Image: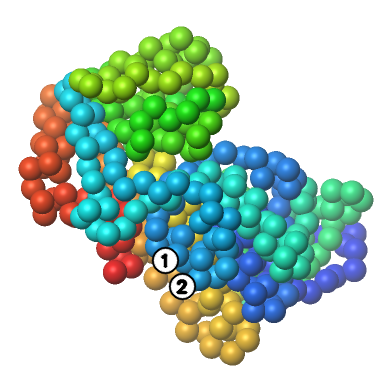
Amino acid sequence: MTAASPAANSAATQRFSVVVVGAGPAGLTVGSILRAAGVDCLVLETGTRAFIERRPRAGVIEEWAVRGLERRGLARTLLERAQTHTECEFRFAGERYRFAYTELTGSHHYIYPQQFLVTDLVREYADVRGGEIRFGVRDVRLHGLESGRPSVSYLCPDSGERCVVDAGFVAGCDGARGVTRTALPPGRARVARHDYGLGWLALLAEAPPSCDCVVFGMHPRGFAGHMARSPEVTRYYLQCPPGDDPENWPHERVWAQLRERLGAAGAPPLKEGRLIERRVLDMHNYVVEPMAFGRLFLAGDAAHLTAPIAAKGLNLALHDAFLLGDGLVAALTKGDDTGLSGYSATCLARVWDYQEFSQWLSGLYHGTASGDPYRAGAALARLRRLFDSPVAARAFAEQYLGCRTTG
Ligand code: RFL
């Protein structure tokens, strides 16, 4: 929400060089980069610390992103605890096809649950680097963006009073449901949207992984996915109608559908367990262009959404955060604005690359169950090409790992 000026009952105004809205992977990474350079900054978060440290979401992190965290001193625990994956498996027409992407690229994936990463980042930002963070804030509003003297106000959870903070810069890192994106003046930003018209039932099972790698099942009844999260917890996906009610998916139906859609000759049986998360995600994407207005810079899901089809959202959030954190440090400590002025265009190049890959992958995952023999035939051709053509295989591996654009 935008407001011209803060409300009248403001407590004394404070000032920070940067106010970061949102303590997800993007916001905490930006904050940690700023603190490492001695820049004062404030992170505002609507959730509690316990809530953000337990919220399960992503788990597949690309190697370049982990190297980026490592270079900024943010990957120590991740590198000790994360698994590495070098292959994935496609199952279709009753057969298993192993795809060894590390052999083709020299690059691999890390498997590390997002809530572990957020726990590491909040500890590093607040406890180690001494960054200020306010949890449980309400009704965050941005002011003065047009004047070039921004401020951010919010309702304090304890007093209920509206607090005002003057900000040299604002980092909008408040995710897909945040408010900073809506502060862009109409006509100054374009929002490109795509709706896939389908849903995924996202599941977390209290069960060890059933395979040593990510598995994608292309089946006439719909796509199914298997992704390790930890030795005790596994994520599964089942394609379903958009807007479907998770109550339509009781335990027995879920496991029967997973067994059917992921079934293939010689595949080990699925290790079943209690379902600790069952939610329907409607598959849609958006991209805000440009990702900056004056002294407001958007990062992560606040600026662009990629449905979990290609497991890219967290990776893009980290890419934005590296560029934004480094750009803000250069501007604030050296007076060098080059990073900030190129921020939006550099981020968007990778964003659109991943958006296009997500489209391509959606055709491959969902064509078989589309009910349209033309799309089903094309999906099968797309799959076979990965195993018939070394050039196609390498192109896929580069996109899957995000290693083409980083070189
Ligand atoms: P986040 O993580 O949503 O963090 C935003 C933070 O802002 C807070 N907030 C506010 N704070 C202050 N004021 C407001 N008005 C606020 N409104 C919201 C929120 O409480 C939150 O703490 O955004 P960020 O940092 O941009 O990170 C993006 C990623 O979280 C997201 O892209 C990924 O989780 C997407 N994703 C995946 N990405 C991958 O790269 N690999 C994966 O394997 C992967 N799997 C997934 C996923 C997303 C999923 N869901 C639930 C959509 C699997 C799933 C099921």
Residue at the disc numbered 2:
343
288 shown above or below 82: below
Q: What residue is drawn where x is 72% and y is 65%?
A: 128
Marks 2 and 1 in Cβ contact (< 8 Å) = yes
396 vs 370: above or below:
below
Of the pair 126 and 334, the residue shown nearer to us? 126
| Residue linked to disc 1 | 347
Query: Residue 258 in the image: x percent, y percent?
Result: 37, 19
Q: Which numbered circle lies on residue 1?
A: none
Kindly identify the amino acid type of the residue bearing the numbered disc 2. Tyr
Residue most extreme to the top: 252
Label 2 CB-ligand 1 distance < 8 A: no
Residue that protrudes farthest toward the front in the picture: 80
Under 8 Å from ligand 1: the CB of mark 1?
no
Q: Quadrant of residue 265?
A: top left
Q: Amino acid at mark 1?
A: Cys
Visible in this render: residue 185?
no
In depth, the one of 83 and 124 nearer the eye is: 83
Residue 20 in the image: above or below residue 255: below
Residue 292 placed where, x, y %?
51, 68
**Which of the 4 quarters of the picture holds residue 150?**
bottom right
- Quarter of the picture holding the N terminus: bottom right
